[in-house]
Each structure stands twice: as structure tokens, then as C-alpha cells.
Amino acid sequence: MNFPQIVQYSLSGITVGSIYAITAIGFNIVYCTTGVINFAQGEFLVVGAMTAISLSRVVPLPVAIALAVLLTTALGGLIELVFIRRARDASVLRLIVITIGLSIVIREAMLHIWDETVRSLPYFTGTTVSTITILGAHISPQILWVLGVSAVIVTALTLFFRFTTVGRAMRACSDDRMAARLCGINDRWMVTLSFMLSAGIGALAGCVISPVTQTQYDMGAPLAIKGFTVAILGGLGNSMAAVVAGLFLGLLEAFTVSQFAAAYKEVVAIVVLLLILVFRPSGLFARRDVSALRTA
Amino acid sequence: MGKRLAVVLSILIVGLVLGAPQSGKREKSPKQKAKQAAATPIKVGAIFAVTGGASNLGAPEQKTAMMFVEKLNSAGGINGQKITLIVKDSGSKPENAISLTKQLIDEEKVLAIIGPSTSGETMAIKNICQEGKTILLSCAAAEDIVNPIASWVLKTPQKDSDAVRRIYQTMKDMGITKIGVVTSNDGFGVAGGAQLAKLAGEHGITIAISEVYDKQATDLTDVLTKIKGQDVKAVVNWSIVPAQSLVAKNMKQIGLDVPLFQSHGFGNIKYVQAGGEAANGTIFPCGRLLVAESLPGSNPQKKVLMSYKQDYEKRYKEDASTFGGHAYDALLILTEAIKKAGSADPAKVRDAIENLKGVVGTGGIFSFSPQDHNGLNQDAFEMLTVKNGKFAIYEKKK
């Protein structure tokens, strides 16, 4: 493989990897505050993109995207208020099953509202054939948007969790919910906020990848599985690790295609997940003592 | 209170979960609701992928079928007998197609089944129809449907082997010999890939690289980068939506600037719109419906094509597609055979179909025989291309 080809595969891998990473971060945010894996996370991406596509017919694109993110955030909060909060005494397993059911309901609702046509947002800059050259590799300018927005999301979240009061309150809930309540933190609202936040970033990610991947009502489930794989790979609850793990998996898939038949691309992700679950179930980056506390 | 609410909600969710995937909608043509005339109506079943991944195929097929039967019935039916069309929605799933087929054969006792829309579904029910001695007029393209021949199973779309032959001939005219092939992993893609591999040698084409991708793939830049690395002079993509537009876009974006040939599944203006500028220049074989207006008046198909196109577009306010045309052809063939046989006896109608010659349909001019259950050859295809976002007849560059 010559150098431009290596760059091309790497860019392809990083693009896909950053999409996985954002989905995984969504999983992590909810997991941190509730211990629940929200399997409807993948659907938030699709709902956000579909809403933006419908709105972009009446308002300019940036406004459509902003509105779509707000609406999806509201949806996330609504889901939490109606389904998760009421079942607050339920075991984690019950809550997970509820989220699986929710993902199916959302998917069918999307089918009825938007039908199964494949749609996409217009490219933010350029058209379907624009291409820019980086180190000999050619990519669509939209790829830079995907990478840029992903980086902004990760940075903003890190700053949010580290430096803002609300962010620190959410971290407190994830460390020890009872202790947080004793400190006067309203843990129930933190849970709602975590759903809203993960829905919002999911929607934003869905909008920015829509020109590249195209959007169809049933895209959410495969994406959620990959995102979940990446979240486990990095260690549940660790967002920075999710980013690294996502990029790692994306690159692994891209270079697998370069060497083997492309048909085996999906196998790689599943094999990696199996290996991790067998040999290092707490994830590549998790500390052993943290994983011991996580059994719920 | 909270626990009761949780129970109610859980039941609601379970109910939705169970109810949601199953979409066996039953629709009867409006004529059937009115009291029928003295003659018993002929029951014809139809299984289309009205929803689900292949709805771009099934929805126009359903609309066309209903339009055809209504027109026929309002003209008095066939020899005074009206047709009752029972349409079922398979949701693009072979498992649903199987259970719906059994329902149509065992409970409704239909004379014939039109559809299904996809090759995967058709292959799943081929044996059931054969054993149930029910005529199956499939709207799906795979060669396997009529090869090996099952005496009760026919199809109306053109053969994919003929599509491949026309593609290769066009390539030869363009002086292309080294190509790359990408196919999706569904029934249609696999069948197409097999034909491409089989017929390459006799047309002097070398397939330098052939890759299979997941039909739900959202990004194909890595597969296409691999193709690009082999220095091919053209790419052939065999899939249905959404990959068709994705391949076109990704190719242009990574700078793979060679001609893109698509399968005859590309024949819907929506795919062109999804691909935007990247779709311009695509070359593909197709039935003549999409360029009906540009055909010379002497073309034997022009009248049928223009009449179907105008009727469909007037009634449903959307562009006609070749997929709807397959359903039109299936019903045309069935009704012509019933007329010819003078009865609705399954065996007699089937034999009548096998003796039909020169039936002018939307997909081509059909001539059946006991050995030929498709009735079309290469001439059913016209090579089309995309110019400025519209379909046009492909002109050979002199």
C-alpha cells in the first residue's frame, strides 16, 4: 500500500470511528448517571437527522439543525420522564429491556411519520461530488465537518463535566447517588438531564453524518450495536476511552477491508467485542477497582 | 399506583412490540366491496413489499396492480368475469412472504399470485407455489426464479444475465476491459455478482477485483479505495437503494473518476436525486418506460408505455417507475392468458401463458414457451444514462 492509500483508509476509518465514538459517548452519559444502557441511543441520531431534513424544507439549514437538536433533546427528556422515572425502583435489567422496547417503538413511529425512503441533508459545504485532497487522499468536505463536530462535542462535554456545576453534579450522581442526594443534588433531574444530553448530542451527530451516510428509518439499530461495542471496548462510563476505542475500531475495520474481503468487515467488530468480553470485560481502559463497584 | 402504571405501560409496550413488526395489511380492491355481477369473480393474489426496505419496488407495484384491475373491471372484466385482487404487504421480509403465500393458496385459493417484489422473497416461496399448483408471476429479477424452471413459476422483469450482457457490450464499445465489481449481500446483489463473474470471459472483460458489502452499509469509501487501488477502468455496482447512490457519491468523493455502471435496479428518478451531481454519467440497462417520450413513434412499445405512464402519473401524482411496470406486465400476461384459455382453470391458464407470443408490455415484448418462463431477451433493455439529473437514452460515443 502506498502512502496516499494509507491516508485514504485512515481517513475512512477515522470518520466511521468518530461516529461510533459519539454514539458510545451517548451510552456513557446515561450509563454514568443511571447504570442503564440506553439502547434507544441509536434512534436519537436518526430522529435528529429526519427532523432536520423535514425542517430544512421550510427554514435555513443551520436553523433546521438547531431546532432538530432541541426537539430530540426534548424527546430524550420526555422518554426519561414517562418511562424511566416511573420505573425508578426497577432493576437495571428491567430498565434496559424498556429501552430496547422504546427503540422499537421509536423506529416504527419514524416509519409511519417519514416512510422508508432514504433521505439526506444537503452537504454543509459543497455538493455530492466535491472533494478535497489531504496528503494525497481525497475526501468529501463533509468528512471534515464530521470530525470537527465530533471533536467539538467531546471537548465541550469534557469541559462541561469538569468545570460546570451541573456537570460536576452529574458526575457526583454517577459516583455515588446516595451521597449526591445527601449533598443536596436533585438526582432525579440529573437523570433526566443525562437523557436529554445524550439525545441532543446524538441528534447533532445524526445531522452531521446524514449527507455522508444517508438516513433511513432503520439505521439506528446497527449503529447502536456498534456504539455499544465501542463503549464496552473503552470501558463503560469512560468517555475519553470511548473516543479512543471508537477510532481504534474504525481504523481496524478500514484496514481489514484493505487486506481481506470487504464482506468480513462486520465480523471484525463482533470478534473484537467477544475477545474483550472474555479477556477484559471492564474494557481496555477501565481500572479494576472501578469495575468492581459497577456491578448493579 | 406506580406499580400498576408500570404494568399497564409494560403491556402497552409489549403489545406494540408484538404488533409493530407484523404488517400483513389486507387490502381489497374497491370493486370487490360492491356487489359483484352474477359470474363469480376470479381471485388473484398479490404479495408486494409495500413497506420495508424494498418499498420503492413494492409501493408502485401495488398502486399499478390496483389501477390495472380497476380499469379492467370497469371495462367489464374478462369475458364478463371480474377480477378480485387481494394485496398483501410482505414488509420486504421473506418470512412474511412465506406465511402470506400459504394464506393466499390455502385460505383464499387464488388462481395466481403476482409478485413478490424482491428476489429473496420469491426464492423463498418458489417451491410453495409449485407444490400448491398456483401460478406465480414474480416481479423480481433473479435468474434463479426461472432457472431451473418450475412449471408454475414465471417472472416479468428482464433477466439479469441479459442486463449484464448489455453492460459488457457497452463496455466493449467503449474499449474497457479491466473492471471492478461491487455488490450488496442481498439476493439481488449475489445473483448479479454471479452473472457478472460468469459472463465476463466471453465478452473479453477482466474483473480485477470483486467485493461484497453489507446492504445496510453507510459508508463505502474503504471498499472503493480498495477498488481504486487496482487501477480499474470502470466500476459495476449491483445493489438496490440506498447503496446505489452511496457508491456514486463515494466514488466521486475519493476521486475514482471512471464510468459507473449500475444494474437495472437503478430505474427510479429518486435514486438519481439522492445521488445529486454524482449520479450524472451513470450508465445502466433499463426498460424503456423511463424514456418513453424520447422513443420514436415506430417503436412497438411506445403506445403501451405512454398510456401506462400517463395513467399512473395522473392518478398517483408521482413519476412512474419500471418496478410498477413489472406488476403491470404480470397482470397483463395473466389476463391475456385467461382470455386465451377461455377459463380460469389454473392448469389451462398456465398452459395459455406458455403459448403467449408477442405480448407488448412495459418491460419489453413477451414471448413465452415451456422452456422460457421469462419471455424477454436482450432487446427488452435500452441502455440509459443520466444527464443533468434526468434519464436519457445512452448514445454511443462515435
Image (spheres, rainbow, N blue to C red):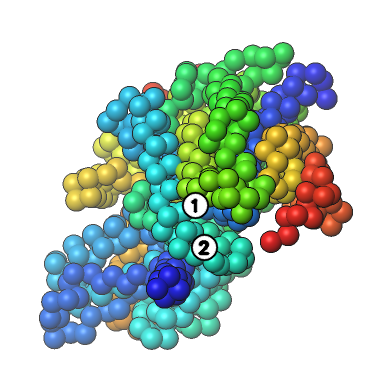
Task: For marks 1 and 2, give the CA distance.
Answer: 9 Å
**Residue A77 location (% of width, % of height):** 43, 48
Q: Residue at x 75, y 18 (%)?
A: A4
**Residue B214 location (% of width, % of height):** 63, 48
Secondary-structure class at tag 2: loop
Same chain check for tags 1 and 2: yes
**Residue B382 location (% of width, % of height):** 44, 39
Which one is in front, B363 or A239? Answer: A239
Is residue B173 visible to us here? no
Do the numbered discs 1 and 2 sit on residues whose CB atoms are within 8 Å?
yes
Q: Which residue is mark 1?
A: A188
Which one is in front, A108 or A136? Answer: A108
Is residue A252 visible to us here? yes
- Give the quadrant of residue B203: top right
- Give the quadrant of residue B205: top right
Looking at the rendered structure, which numbered label has been put on residue B13? none
Q: Which residue is mark 2?
A: A88
- Give the quadrant of residue A29: top right
Which one is in front, B391 or B53? Answer: B53
Q: Residue at x 51, y 22 (%)?
A: A129
Secondary-structure class at tag 1: helix
Q: Earlier in the sequence, mark 1 or mark 2?
A: 2
Q: Residue at x 13, y 86 (%)?
A: B38
The subunit carrying tag 2 is A
